[in-house]
Image (cartoon, grey):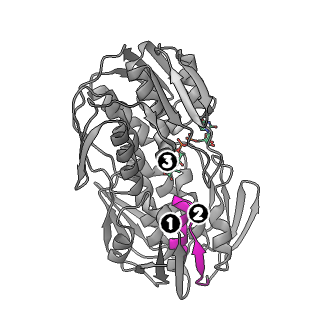
């Protein structure tokens, strides 16, 4: 097990390159199950979740190469439709294999992902939609056992669900007839999946809107074109937060500012300058870091995946900030760790009040989930002295070359063995 040792710093400088988006690459890799040809993909981040997914695909009988952020995936050799618990439990997005496996093979078994630190994370909406499309779904010994030929139909999601939308978009691609998805997720990662399927010849309308119409191929696999994974908007937002919390000027490169409008707007409201030039975003120091109000919501609203990072940033603001976490019921795991650093945070259900402080104390803290862990690093950059962030395997799931990128910005950060 490793931990990160971080010394508080007065400021950062320079620039970092943003990697491909984990949450775009995951559904895109799974969508290769729908391909009739070998799929070539570029700008894939080399992080633990991606490698876990490739292991799952290998288990199902697919073959692939993955190096230098590029992959070639061949699913013509798929010969197993059981996604086993010991892999799915490591990476809950494995549930994304349910829709495509069922659509292609008309039967499959996928382990229930189970909960995680940030919440119960049910998949009822995924299963309800597949049943509406004609699937027989049973839960047996912790597995979703699905069978049946899928037919297009109208699906209204009770809640906007990112992987639920992605699962059903992929299932509908091979179904017989038209599927209309209402209240569908519009995250950039969902949009890239739809664009990729459209480029492969799928008849899909309403990409990026609240309603999608998909005319399935009735089992005919699709000829995929080469895919270039979009930049990771959450990684970009995290490094911009590092610039903000040290009140420094830093630049993130190979980013897409259009995917971060709500986040950039909050930086501006807090008093930071934001400059965008092509695929580069620069944050400039604030004369006075103002307190902020944030309500997390589905895209294009403020992303829940940036909530923890902005809570750390709010520790440096003048006055009291309010953060209302609307998506997950337990996404404040970072609060108790920040309190150990001397933060003044009060929780009332899903609402946190954060009173800014001039000083934060270094401490040993524990990572609990991917984004909470990055918030602890940000707080450690602001704290006086040397902090240690433990259980950083959470970070390695979604941040590529994390300490190298922070070091490049001038942070004093080391990865050490417990
Ligand atoms: C995706 O998770 C992301 N993961 C999450 O990022 C992100 O936080 C989340 O979307 C919200 O943006 C990937 O894309 C791999 P949801 P997902 O289904 O799809 C409820 C990270 O840090 N819900 O959109 O699992 C659910 O409980 C991760 O990279 C149901 O009730 O999230 C939650 O309250 C963390 N029933 C809300 O909907 C369902 O069947 C949104 O969840 C499905 C979801």
Q: Position of residue 115 (x, y in %)?
A: 62, 47
Tell me which numbered mark, 1 or 3, is placed earlier along the sequence: 3
Res. 316 in view: no
Q: Position of residue 416 (x, y in %)?
A: 43, 79
Examine the structure image and report whether residue 151 is included in the region drawn in magenta.
no
Tell me which numbered mark, 2 or 3, is placed earlier along the sequence: 3
Residue closest to the eye, 331 or 365 = 365
**Left or right: 34 as drawn, with respect to 415:** left
Q: Residue at x 45, y 55 (%)?
A: 234
Tell me the magenta residue range: 361-379
**Left or right: 393 as drawn, with respect to 276:** right
Res. 402 in view: yes
Q: Secondary structure at mark 1?
A: helix
Q: Is residue 103 above or below residue 32?
A: above
How many numbered discs sit on the rendered protein?
3
Residue assigned mark 3: 86
Q: Position of residue 146 (x, y in %)?
A: 52, 24
**Left or right: 58 as drawn, with respect to 266:** left
Residue assigned mark 1: 374
Residue closest to the eye, 61 or 96 = 61
Q: Residue at x 41, y 42 (%)?
A: 189
Label 1 – label 2 distance at C-alpha: 10 Å
Image depth: mark 2 or mark 3 in front: 3
Q: Which mark is residue 368?
A: 2
């Amino acid at each position: 097990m490793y931990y990160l040792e971080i010394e508080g710093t007065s400021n950062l400088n320079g620039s970092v390159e943003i990697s491909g988006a984990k949450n775009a690459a995951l559904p895109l890799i799974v969508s290769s199950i729908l391909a009739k040809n070998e799929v070539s993909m570029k700008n894939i981040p080399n992080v633990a979740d991606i490698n876990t997914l490739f292991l799952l695909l290998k288990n199902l009988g697919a073959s692939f190469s993955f190096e230098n952020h590029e992959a070639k995936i061949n699913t013509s050799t798929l010969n197993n439709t059981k996604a086993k618990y010991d892999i799915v439990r490591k990476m809950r997005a494995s549930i994304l294999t349910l829709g495509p496996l069922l659509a292609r093979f008309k039967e499959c078994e996928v382990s229930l992902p189970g909960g995680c630190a940030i919440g119960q994370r049910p998949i009822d909406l995924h299963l309800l939609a597949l049943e509406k499309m004609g699937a027989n779904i049973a839960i047996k010994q912790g597995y979703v056992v699905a069978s049946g030929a899928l037919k297009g139909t109208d699906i209204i999601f009770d809640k906007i669900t990112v992987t639920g939308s992605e699962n059903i978009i992929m299932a509908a691609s091979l179904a017989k007839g038209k599927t209309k998805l209402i209240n569908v997720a519009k995250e950039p990662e969902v949009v890239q999946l739809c664009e990729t399927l459209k480029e492969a010849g799928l008849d899909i309308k309403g990409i990026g809107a609240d309603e999608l119409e998909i005319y399935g191929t009735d089992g005919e696999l699709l000829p995929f074109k080469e895919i270039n994974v979009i930049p990771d908007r959450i990684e970009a937002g995290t490094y911009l937060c590092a610039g903000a919390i040290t009140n420094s000027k830093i630049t993130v490169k190979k980013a897409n500012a259009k995917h971060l409008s709500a986040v950039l707007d909050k930086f501006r409201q807090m008093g930071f300058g934001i400059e965008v030039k092509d695929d580069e975003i620069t944050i400039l120091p604030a004369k006075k870091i103002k307190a902020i109000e944030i309500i997390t919501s589905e895209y294009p609203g403020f992303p829940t995946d940036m909530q923890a990072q902005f809570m750390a940033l709010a520790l440096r603001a003048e006055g009291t900030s309010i953060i209302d976490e609307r998506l997950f019921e337990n996404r404040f795991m970072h609060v108790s760790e920040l309190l150990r650093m001397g933060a003044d945070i009060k929780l009332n259900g899903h609402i946190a009040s954060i009173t800014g402080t001039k000083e934060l104390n270094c401490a040993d803290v524990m990572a609990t989930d991917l984004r909470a862990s990055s918030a602890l690093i940000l707080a450690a950059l602001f704290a006086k002295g040397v902090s240690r962030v433990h259980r950083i395997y959470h970070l390695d799931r979604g941040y590529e070359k994390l300490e190298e990128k922070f070091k490049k910005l001038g942070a004093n950060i080391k990865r050490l063995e417990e």
